[in-house]
Amino acid sequence: THLHIESSLVTPFEFDRCVTPRGVTTAICDPHEIANVCGLDGIGYFLDASARTLMDIRVQLSSCVPSTHMETAGARLEAADLIPLMDHPRVIGLAEFMNFPGVLFKDPGCMAKLDAWQGKHIDGHAPLLRGMDLNGYLSAGIRTEHEATTAEEALEKLRKGMRVLIREGSVSKDLHALAPILTERHSPYLCLCTDDRNPLDIGEHGHLDHMIRTAIGLGCPPLAVYRAASLSAAEAFGLKDRGLIAPGKRADIAVIDSLERCHAGMVFAGGVQVTDAAFAARQTIPPVARNSVKAPTVEPHHFRWGGNRVDTPVIGILPGKIITEHLTYDIAPVDGDKRPDLSRDLIRIAVIERHGKNGNRATGFVRGFGLQRGAIASTVCHDHHNIAVVGADYADMALAANRLGQIEGGFVVVEGGKVLAELPLPVAGLMSLESFEHVRDRLVALRAAAASLGVVLEEPFLQLAFLALPVIPHLKITDHGMVDVDRFEVLP
């Protein structure tokens, strides 16, 4: 169901080649990563590509570009921009409505989109939203949601008429917490989704097939799991021609070795057998959004953080979650700069605007990386996709950020003035033009390089990317500054 193909770090054609053989024959994607970089051109690229893949890729129209007013994106999409695509044959409704405060406070731009899509599918995004606030959000016509992280939260959303998408991505791992509700009673109203899953995890563990194996291994009834992965998902998004093998239905068939192992030996997508020859016969299209990194050159002193107050907000990482803690530490300035304190795992984080709009820079602190030296930088920086960089050394941070401009975006690991590893992502600073296998191998090298700096996170690059998303509680950072998500404001 809900996913962002860009998070696989490859084009839709390579995503098709690496995921369809696993038995995943339909994907409902929100291209809001590329849309935040190049707007309608990015959505158009996905629509054109989706007509040429073996997998049936359906596109939801990105509803929150940018996600809030507290960030600088490369584009802005209003209701008038999206309405002409509403009835496109490959479009399924409006994508995840991330700006839930905008819904609750009746922001005019949000209301215009919601009004235009009444009676059609509107996907949700409401982390930790409960009680009357959830009631108000649902009253806007939103009926699916993938941000539940506890069984209690998911059950409230189910009771109030939502279909809950159980998520297991590369960073957001909610399957273990929600497995108790994946029963035969609830499965008609549950779906499985990956949201953001990188090629290393897809290659090593799988995609939806991995979720199926894991859920059954956790004790969920197999038939409930398979229903959530197929028929319930199709029904939730109005795809009445698929979801089960039956006369008159679309011929999407995966021949697997067993219910528990879920290894596909033969796959048919829309009646076409999935083979290397079938992939080779596809007519691909050129990518868009090349040379998208337009950030100014940064210097080491740009990463200083002044201020007279000792008490300092710090982003606290929760491994396996994109929700963060809002921590406060006493950090005394030295020569006008609050410096990283490696003994307390307090390292510098910065976001640099890279779309050529204003050259904004913001700095702060994050705890949880374990990094002891060097720097890590990325142009995958949800959802505005500016440059995010963390580090213990300002010169290494500057080198890492500037290197991203030279390689058209991607991931970089630096130590002692040298680039240890990098992965260019020249398509919008988000996707590679290389093969899935090449990207996977580069990620292995990047993770090893990050670990050599002391990083303790299993997936440091996506974890870094989500530290800049100001619609996920509790404390984040954008190019505007540190953002208190609960109060929905930039900290002074």
Image (cartoon, helix red, strand yellow):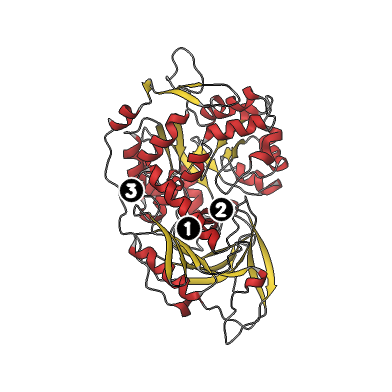
Residue at 53 percent across and 38 percent down: it is 205
Residue at 38 percent across and 26 percent down: it is 274
Residue 341, x across and y down, in percent = 63, 74
Real-space Cα separation, disc 2 to disc 1, in angstroms: 27 Å
Instruction: Determine whether the residue tagged by mark 2 lies in a helix, strand or loop.
Output: loop
Whether residue 81 appears in this view of the structure is yes
Residue 211 placement: quadrant: top right
Residue 200, x across and y down, in percent = 48, 45
The label shown at residue 381 is 1
Say what amino acid the circle numbered 2 marks.
Lys
Real-space Cα separation, disc 3 to disc 2, in angstroms: 41 Å
Residue 373 placement: quadrant: bottom right
Q: Nearer the viewer, residue 152 or 390?
A: 390
Residue 230, x across and y down, in percent = 53, 26
Whether residue 118 appears in this view of the structure is no
The label shown at residue 106 is 2
Residue 57, x across and y down, in percent = 41, 34
Say what amino acid the circle numbered 1 marks.
Cys
Say what amino acid the circle numbered 3 marks.
Leu
Real-space Cα separation, disc 1 to disc 3, in angstroms: 19 Å
Residue under numbered circle 3: 433
Q: Is residue 45 above or below residue 319?
A: above
Q: Residue furthest bottom?
A: 335
- Point out the tag, 1 or 3, that comes first from the N-terminus: 1
Instruction: Determine whether the residue tagged by mark 1 lies in a helix, strand or loop.
Output: loop
